[in-house]
Amino acid sequence: MPTLRRQLPSANALFVFESAARCGNFTKAAAELGVTQPAVSRMLALLEEYLEVKLFLRTPGKTVLTESGEILYQGVIDGFHNIEAAIQEIRARSTGLETVTLSVSTAFTTHWLMPRMHRLQAQLPHIDLRFQLISGAVSGSVEDVDLGIRFVTGEDILHDASLILPEILVPVCSPAYRKQQLESPGIDVSTTLISLSDSRIDWFELLPNFHLQAYGTTHSLVFSDYAVVIQAALLGQGIAIGWLNIASHWLETGSLVPATPTAIATERLCHLVHSRKKPLSEAAKQVREWIIAETRNDVANVSKQYPELNLESFMAKGF
């Protein structure tokens, strides 16, 4: 920090720079900061003089960051985000509550977490949850959250990862759909396959014998939100690929059943990950351990109910 102080005309220069870079216009930045446009121009000129580089390319009506400006802007917003997060955590701790932010799918939140939220609140009453929700396949940065659920392979030097379980896929449907559509050979029925639009899953590549177990004409329902995929299966609209870390609750309760006695484990592993730039708080660690324990308990129960899926062998390979 002493070195940083010597490299800047004032700490306020960073706030002025961030506003000007984000707004793309010195006049707009001045209005946001409550100062005059010449004051913004002078501060930024002083900052450029100190750094001995141009930070902005000035054009009529707007300003554009130079390469040096882009580098500084990324560093500034990262620093501001970290400071803001630290302040929020301090304020939360002063109230006796700690906030943990999760980057997870809408499907995980709707179909796995919501049915057991009361249990989480009873076991971790001092923690409030916030969500960054993803409707399709889970991906993206976890820089701005405490924990994210991601499917990964290999080493990841940017994140620390805690294994939940291997990626295990089970074709699932409602009990009524299985009875009416799959246990009635000889009846002229059709089979509806419910899929996620941005999924890499190919039904007949993943399950080469599935066409031998499906009867009649095959139709498709394709959704961009996996929460809707599972909901459609629960409502008896067809057969969906069930990611076990999401569908396990409904399999355990019997609201969904295996459409065929088949489970597939891919090369990917389901992890709870967090950025190595940000130390994990004790509250986030508690949420992480709770999710892992609950998921593995679910899988153990599903394994007992459906031994034909041979889930134990898949779980053993992941650990």
Image (cartoon, helix red, strand yellow):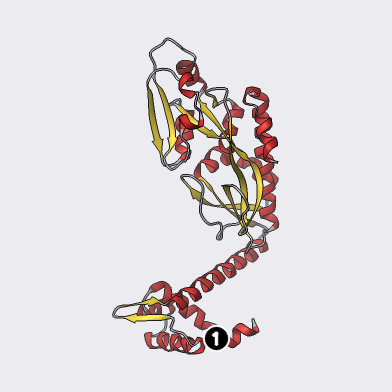
In the image, what residue type sits under mark 1? Leu
Please state which of residues 34 and 20 is positioned toward the viewer in this rendering.
Answer: 20
* Residue at image location 69% in from the left, 31% down from the top: 312
Residue farthest along the top direction in this orientation: 186
* Residue at image location 62% in from the left, 52% down from the top: 273
Crowd tier of the residue under label 1, counting other residues whose Cα lies within 10 Å: few below 14, some 14–19, many 20 or above: some
- Residue 291 in view (yes/no): no
- Looking at the image, is 287 positioned above or below residue 47? above
Residue farthest along the left direction in this orientation: 60
- Residue 27 in view (yes/no): yes
Percent across and percent down for residue 229 are: 46, 35
Count of numbered labels shown in the rendering: 1
* Residue at image location 60% in from the left, 85% down from the top: 5
Give the quarter of the figure containing the N terminus: bottom right
- Looking at the image, is 171 positioned above or below residue 215? below
> Relative to 108, is 313 on the left or the right?
right
